[in-house]
Image (cartoon, helix red, strand yellow):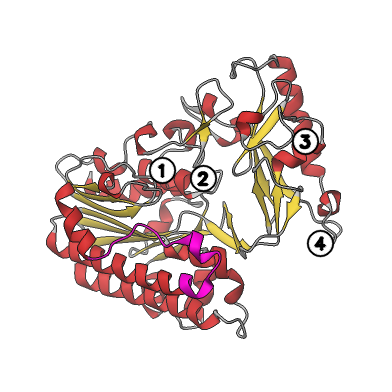
Amino acid sequence: MDVRKVLVLGLDGVPYSLLRRLMESGHLPALAEIAGSGTFLPMETALPPVSSVAWASFMTGANPGEHGIFGFTDLKDREISLHLPSFDDLRRPPVWQTLPGKKSVVVNLPFTYPARPLSGVLIAGFVAPIFERSVYPESLIPWLQSKNYRVDVDSVRGRQDRAFLVRDLFETLSVHEEVMLSLARSEPWDLFIGVITGTDRLHHFFFDAFDDENHRWHSHFLEYYRRIDAFVDGFVRRVGHGVRVILLSDHGFTRLKWQIYLNQLLRSMGYLSYVRPDPQSIHDVHPSARAFAMDPGRIYVHGSDRFRTGFLGPVAIEEIKSQLKSKLERLRPVDVGIYDAESDERLFAEVLFKEEVYTGSCTDLAPDLVVIPSRGYDVKAAVNAPSVAMKDIFTGMHTHDDAFLMVNDPSAGEKRSKWHITDVAGLITEVLA
C-alpha cells in the first residue's frame, strides 16, 4: 500500500490490558479489526506518567531530559517556587514542525497551549485557560464556539455530581468527534492528530465500574468505549486507503487504593520542614530543609548548585539521594499506617536517580529522584495533606507502563522489541519526512 498520510488518534490514559479485555469481550469490533490485521502492543511512557510529560515526549520523540518538561508544574530558576510550564517552554520542536511542506491538523493534543502558528490547524488540549489563545488560526474560533466546543469536561463539578460528569463526558466526546471529523473533511492535511481526553477522566472517576456489573455506572463505562470504537471506525473509513493509522495512549491506568503524600513522608523522616505551621505551597519550604517533593513522585535535594537557598554540597547531595532511595524502597504500606495490604508488598516499586531516567541537555532541570509507586499507590506532593496516606474519591491512577500502541501495519511491531512513547514520532516521520 502506498502510504502518503498519517492519522494519529490518541486515547488518553487507556491501558493496553483494559483495551485487550474490551476487544476480546466483543465491545470494540472496529479496534479489534485494526489490531487483528495490524500491530497491537503494550508500550511504556515517560516518567513521571502525566499527560504534559507524556504527550510532550510523543510530539517531540524525545525524553524529558531533551524537551525539558517534567510535570504540569515545575520550578522557577534557582527558586523553590512554582512555575507552570506551557507549550512555549518545550525545548524540542513538535513533529509537525519537522515536516517542511506538509500540512497538519492537531486537535485537543494536551500541552499545546498557547497555540503556535503552523502550516495547518491547531486546537490546543488541556490545560488551556484562555480559549482565544488555544486556536490557530483564530478565524476558527467563532465556528468552534457555535459548536459549543470545550477543551475538557468540568471535573471540578464532576467531583460533586457524578450524573453530571457522565453526561458531560458523552456531550464533550460528541463535540470533539464532530470537530475532528469536520476538520478532516474540510482542511487539507498530511498529518492529523486528534486526542480524546475523556477516557482519562472516565478512568479517574469510574475505573472501579468496569469489573463490577452491579456498579451504577458500569453500563455507561462500556457505552463510552463503544462510542470511542464507533468514532474510530467512522474516522478510519472516512480517510480511506493510503493512510497510516496510529492509535496510542499516553500512559496506563490501574485501580487506586491509596494516595501517598511524599512531602508528609519526607517531613516525618526528618528531611523537610516549613517556615510556617500550615504550609500552603512549596514556597513555604524552610531554608534548612534537605529535600522536598513535587507532583507526581519527583524529589529534589536542596543543593547549593541548584537553589539560591541551597546549602548542600555535592557529597551531601549524593549521600541524601542514596539514603532516600534505600529508605523509600524498603517501605511497606504498614509503615505509613496502611493495614489492608499484603505483608510483603512494597509501597514503592522503584526509586530512580535522574541519571537512570533522563538524558539530554535539560537533565540538570530534572528531579534528583523519581518515585515509581507499586500498583494502587498514587504518589502526590501536596504540602498540606493531613497524613501520609489518604483515600480519595478517584478510583483509578496512572501507570508508566501498560500504555498501548496500535498501527494498521502488521510489520510496525517488528521495528523494535520494546516500545516507548518517544518511538511513535518515528512512525510518523518515516511516512512524511
Is residue 358 at least partly visible in the picture? Answer: yes
Q: Is residue 157 magenta?
A: yes
Question: Could you say which is closer to the camera, residue 250 or residue 383?
Answer: 383
Select label 3 or label 1 by which is in front. 3
Name the residue that disc number 1 marks.
56
Mark 1 Cα-neighbour bin, 10 Å: few <14, some 14–19, many ≥20 = many
Magenta part of the protein: which range?
A: 147-165
Between 293 and 351, the one lying in front of the other is 293
Q: CA distance from mark 3 to mark 4?
A: 23 Å
The residue sitting at the bottom extreme is 214
Q: CA distance from mark 1 to mark 2?
A: 9 Å
Query: Which residue is located at x 68 percent, y 43 percent?
Result: 384
Asked if residue 334 lies left or right of residue 132, the reply is: right
> For mark 4, what is the residue?
341
- Residue 240 appears in view: no
Image coordinates for residue 167, horizontal then vertical, percent: 42, 74
- Label 2: how many Cα within 10 Å (few below 14, some 14–19, many 20+): many
Up the image or down, 385 lies above or below 201; here it is above
Identify which residue, 204 or 387, lies in the foreground.
387
What residue is shown with label 3?
A: 267
Residue 15 is left or right of residue 95, and the answer is right
